[in-house]
Image (tube, rainbow, N blue to C red):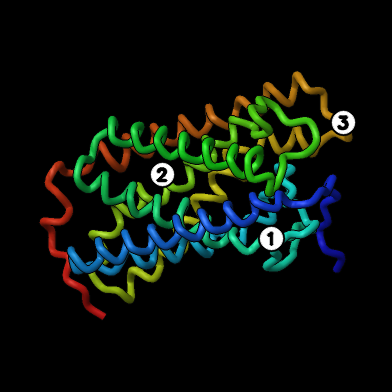
Amino acid sequence: MAPVDTLGQDQPVGEWGQVVGTGLTFALAFFAVGYVVTVARRDRITWPFFLLLSGGLTCLMEPLYDHLYGLWFYEEDQWNLYETFGSSQPVWVPAAYVAFYGGASVFVARTLMRTPNMRTVWTMYFAVAAMAVVAEIAYVSVFELYSYQDDQPYKFFGYPLFLGFTNAMSALVAGTLAFRVAPMLPRAVDQVAMIALVPGAFAFGLFGTGILYLSVRHGFENPPMPLVYLAALTVPLAIASTVRLLGICLVKTATSAPVESRPTSVHV
């Protein structure tokens, strides 16, 4: 079976950018791991480890995202980890997912456990979105590690801004689900199922709420840009609707009593 292939306009990776970007990404990943270890030891819980692992494993979905949304990791001089879907994945990608998806999901869940209300939901959402936008602009325009190719809507310093909302959705949805399901799973053997949360949230945000945009982007040889811009708006609108839905159904209905006060003993 022939593999999916993406033909990108390549160029050398930023020489100093690769060093700084890789080092910074792994530093953030170590910080996320340290945060999870601290939380787990302090509160004697295990589910944050499974959510962190869930975020890390989601990196396996990155090549499909690259192909569909037009992201191209520069291959020349790249510190390569592996290649699939016609995309060469650099060594720092798994660390980025541990930090920005695994660690952020745990942080969202823990924050909601302390203050379960809609204000917290929207604050977490926009905070993660802002973090995603700043990080991606740095990787694209400062470190010069990859680019979004072809004609992209709403570009700012090389980054399509509407995609920041999709990245935020993955961590927010996974964290919100973990906020509700973790207290229902006192045994570590049951918490293993939480490994599916972040990949599921990632697919929901990028391939679910993005389906209209992707249909336009890939439905024409040269899609008319006004239609592309219009379709791109459906992504953050669908995401906002989903965030509101989950907030109403999963957060507003939750008791205001701190989750930490409920039984959280670990059984295997």
At label 1, counting other C-alpha atoms closer than 10 Å, the crowd grade (few under 14, some 14-19, many 20 or more) is many
Vertical order, 224 against 6 (above or below): above
The answer to whether the residue labelled 2 contacts the one labelled 3, judged by CB atoms less than 8 Å apart, is no
Residue at image location 22% in from the left, 68% down from the top: 41
Marked residue nearer the N-terminal end (2 or 1):
1
Label 2, label 1: how far apart the Cα atoms are = 25 Å
Residue to which mark 3 is pinned: 222
Residue located at (31% from left, 50% from top): 109
Describe the element under mark 2 as helix, strand or loop. helix
Residue 208 x/y as whole percent: 59, 43
Label 2 – label 3 distance at C-alpha: 34 Å
To which quarter of the image does residue 158 belong? top right
Q: Secondary structure at mark 3?
A: loop
Q: Quadrant of the N terminus?
A: bottom right
Where 108 falls versus 186 (above or below)? above
Q: Nearer the viewer, residue 9 or 109?
A: 9
* Left or right, residue 253 beside residue 214: left
Nearer the viewer's eye, disc 2 or disc 1? 1
Q: How many marks?
A: 3
Give the residue drawn at x 58%, y 52%: 21
Q: Which residue is mark 1?
A: 89
Q: CA distance from mark 3 to mark 1?
A: 27 Å
The residue depicted at 53 percent of the width and 58 percent of the height is 23
Q: Secondary structure at mark 1?
A: strand
State left or right for residue 20 relative to residue 251.
right
Q: Nearer the viewer, residue 135 or 166?
A: 135
> In the image, 42: left or right of 243?
left
